[in-house]
């Protein structure tokens, strides 16, 4: 048994599995979420994100495996609202209650007083709407209220299911800054989403799942390093292009040959036969190539960035898995 406090703030999932009849919602999932970081919990619709969060919160019983927060299952946490703040997808609000009254309902369990409720509403941008009925709140305002509710007990761990849903671009930018601020205080922040692009600017780490299985877990920097850089270049001067590539040590695809291609133009006056060439180069940026071509006085007719972006990597990762996943896709 590890000494108390060793796992403080760590969210751990070990060999976690959940079947609903024939549907394998979560399959042998293992990962850790660390304090002081914002972690994106990513996967396409129906990949098992909410089911995993529900098991972490003791709302669903694992078929096998464990889900713990600070080393303990949720049910064993003495004062759960002071340790874990969670906002799941279908957070429901009593439409007749004001935002402030909604917080007051939970405040006693979280050890929060009225002043804290009001301060939190202010913090999430609902200061002006504190005494308005939630029934009249927009989806984005409800998301902000859900966030304020998770923060009532000043918990170490925050589990937020698609928190940017319904927020406008300004709200998304605000949320980004707010989550970073919370992680900066040493909190463990998990944000689920079905789109990497939605969270890529705000997360430090990523856990990617598809069809209930772990696909990838790393820091955002490590994931970014998987993104390839490649360009496509077309020059009417194959020989000149070949010379430039050789001088720079850049290996083109396909190789450039000096032999004039079909449709060769004969330059007036210089009587030099010139063939056009189109090649692709890896690990060279358009800026690098553009500068090199400029200094070599090489004529270029097209220069395109063909790099694989982060979202492409994410889509490739989750697509690769869906072929092998079988039952999890039964929905
Ligand atoms: N109570 C349930 N009974 C039966 N099947 C369920 C139940 N809850 C979830 N599932 C199934 O488990 C799978 C995973 O669903 P889950 O809601 O965890 O995915 P998700 O990644 O959160 O999806 P989304 O991004 O759409 O919210 C789906 O096939 C879903 O239909």
Image (spheres, rainbow, N blue to C red):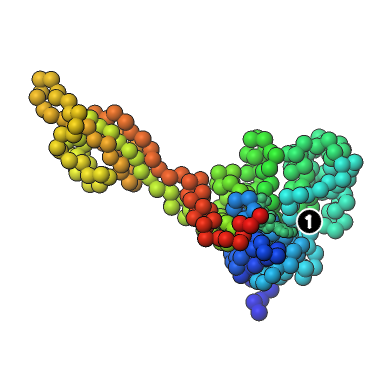
Looking at the image, can residue 116 be seen?
yes
The quarter of the picture showing ligand 1: bottom right
Residue 266 image-quadrant placement: top left
- Where residue 1 sits in the image (x, y, percent)? 66, 79
Crowding at dot 1, Cα within 10 Å, few <14 / some 14-19 / many 20+, comes out as many
- Where residue 206 sits in the image (x, y, percent)? 56, 55
| Closer to the camera in the image, 6 or 223 | 223
Callout 1: helix, strand or loop? loop
Residue 277 image-quadrant placement: top left
- Which residue is at 78% across, 49% downward? 91
The quarter in which the C terminus is drawn is bottom right
Q: Is residue 224 left or right of residue 303?
A: right
- Where residue 248 sits in the image (x, y, percent)? 23, 43
- Pick out the residue farthest to the top: 269
- Which residue is at 74% across, 43% downward? 143
- Which residue is at 10% across, 20% downward? 269
């Amino acid at each position: 048994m590890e000494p108390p406090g060793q796992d403080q703030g760590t969210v751990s999932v070990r060999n976690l599995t959940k079947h609903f009849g024939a549907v394998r919602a979560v399959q042998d999932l293992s990962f850790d979420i660390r304090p002081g970081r914002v972690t994106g919990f990513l996967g396409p619709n129906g990949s098992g994100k909410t089911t995993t969060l529900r098991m972490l919160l003791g709302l669903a019983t694992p078929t096998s495996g464990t889900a713990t927060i600070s080393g303990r299952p949720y049910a064993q946490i003495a004062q759960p609202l002071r340790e874990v703040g969670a906002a799941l997808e279908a957070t429901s609000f009593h439409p007749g209650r004001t935002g402030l009254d909604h917080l007051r309902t939970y405040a006693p369990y979280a050890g929060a007083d009225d002043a804290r409720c009001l301060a939190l509403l202010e913090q999430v941008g609902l200061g002006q709407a504190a005494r308005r009925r939630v029934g009249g709140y927009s989806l984005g305002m409800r998301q902000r209220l859900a966030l304020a509710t998770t923060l009532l007990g000043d918990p170490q761990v925050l589990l937020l299911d698609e928190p940017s849903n319904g927020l406008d671009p300004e709200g998304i930018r605000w949320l980004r800054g707010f989550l970073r601020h919370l992680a900066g205080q040493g909190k463990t922040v998990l944000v689920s989403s079905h789109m990497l692009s939605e969270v890529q600017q705000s997360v430090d780490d990523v856990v990617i799942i598809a069809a209930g299985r772990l696909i990838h877990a790393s820091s955002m920097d490590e994931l970014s390093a998987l993104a390839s850089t490649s360009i496509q270049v077309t020059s009417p001067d194959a020989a000149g292009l070949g010379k430039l590539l050789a001088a720079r040590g850049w290996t083109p695809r396909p190789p450039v040959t000096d032999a004039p291609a079909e449709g060769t133009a004969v330059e007036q006056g210089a009587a030099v036969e010139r063939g056009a060439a189109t090649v692709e180069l890896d690990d060279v940026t358009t800026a690098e190539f553009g500068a090199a071509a400029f200094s070599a006085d090489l004529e270029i007719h097209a220069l395109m960035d063909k790099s694989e972006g982060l979202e492409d990597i994410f889509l490739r990762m989750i697509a690769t898995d869906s072929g092998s996943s079988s039952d999890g896709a039964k929905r």
